[in-house]
Image (tube, rainbow, N blue to C red):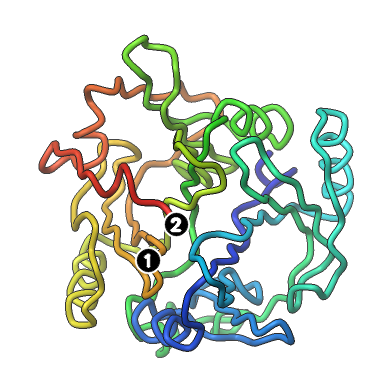
Amino acid sequence: MGINGVLRPGHAQIRVLNLEEDAKFYREVLGLEEVGRDAQDRVYFKAWDERDHHSVIIRQADKAGLDFFGFKVSDNATLNKLEADLNAYGVKTERVPAGELLATGERVRFTVPTGHVIELYAEKKDVGNGLSYSNPAPWPAQAEKGIAPTRMDHALLGGGDLDGSRDIFINVLGFYLTEEVVAEDGKTQIAVWLSCSNKTHDIAFVRAPEDGKLHHVSYWIDTWEKVLRAADLMSMNHVPVDIGPTRHGITRGATIYAFDRSGNRFETFAGGYISYPDMHKLTWPIEHLPEGLDYAQRKLHETFLTVFS
């Protein structure tokens, strides 16, 4: 795990209903940098402090949602090992050739029991963050455009067989459980937060009536003050806000949830705590989900529990 295995979330390919309208939203409101387009009419973006070529890809479709979510691994030997481990665990994989995504090497693709397509890859072009690798400034001038997150941080995915997807991430990919929401029986997990790093989570799953659903893709911003700035920018640009600004009890993160022009939920996220694999997981009984979600109001938000793309 960690630097010896899966490093971090690397990319999300998101379906949108109007390519140019959403491309403008991701550039000008969310404040990502457009870095390329390909022959499949996909548009590629990166957050300002990401050094790899892209982290978000959008394509036009008849239905919003998530095509796949990818993780970068430490090297090609690790990619080969994890593919063999997945196969030994009974997970069917396929190889996607290098170059099928711009500036990206060969990818290992598989579907987890919640119906989500997950990818692993080892190589993506380093394009830098606009700063020198020698004596760099703390931030480039273009970092102030829009909300301007520093990175794509994680995703929350919804589907039926949460247990099966959780087990693949823990038993094969080396993730560990940081937090959980459990049902009235005290055992059945309603949602889980999983980390491959020192973050509170790099991916999360929630039980949902339909498989393959996207709850949100999250973007990291540095401070609570910038969360409030993001709220101002959302209002200025008539962005539909679902929840926030507030703090989660779960993960302790400061947050706003809102929707892109096609109805895909996204999060602007700051804070949280440093996590380690030897730390005891945190459990939220279902009756305490209101403060787990919105600690300030201790309130369940109906759309947060029911709206997916």
Label count reads: 2
Residue topped by disc 1? 263
Question: Seen from this angle, which residue lies furthest front?
Answer: 62
Q: Is residue 15 above or below residue 188?
A: below
Residue at 44%, 23% (x, y): give it.
189
Q: Quadrant of residue 121?
A: bottom right
x and y percentages locating residue 138 in the rendered image: 43, 77
- Quadrant for the N terminus, please: top right
Q: Looking at the picture, does residue 294 appear above or below residue 261?
A: above
In the picture of the structure, the residue carrying the numbered disc 2 is 309
Q: Is residue 294 left or right of residue 208?
A: left
Q: Secondary structure at mark 1?
A: loop
Residue 230 lies, with reference to residue 110, above or below; the image says: below
Badge 2 vs badge 1, beta-carbon distance below 8 Å: yes
Give how far across and how far down residue 273 sits, in percent: 37, 42
From the viewer's side, name the closer residue of 222 and 307.
Answer: 307
* Extreme residue in the top direction: 185
Q: CA distance from mark 2 to mark 1?
A: 7 Å
Q: Residues within 10 Å of mark 1 (few under 14, many from 20)?
A: some
Q: Quadrant of residue 295?
A: top left
Q: Amino acid at mark 2?
A: Ser
Give the SS element for disc 2. loop
Quadrant in which residue 206 is drawn: top left
Which quarter of the rendering shows the C terminus? bottom left
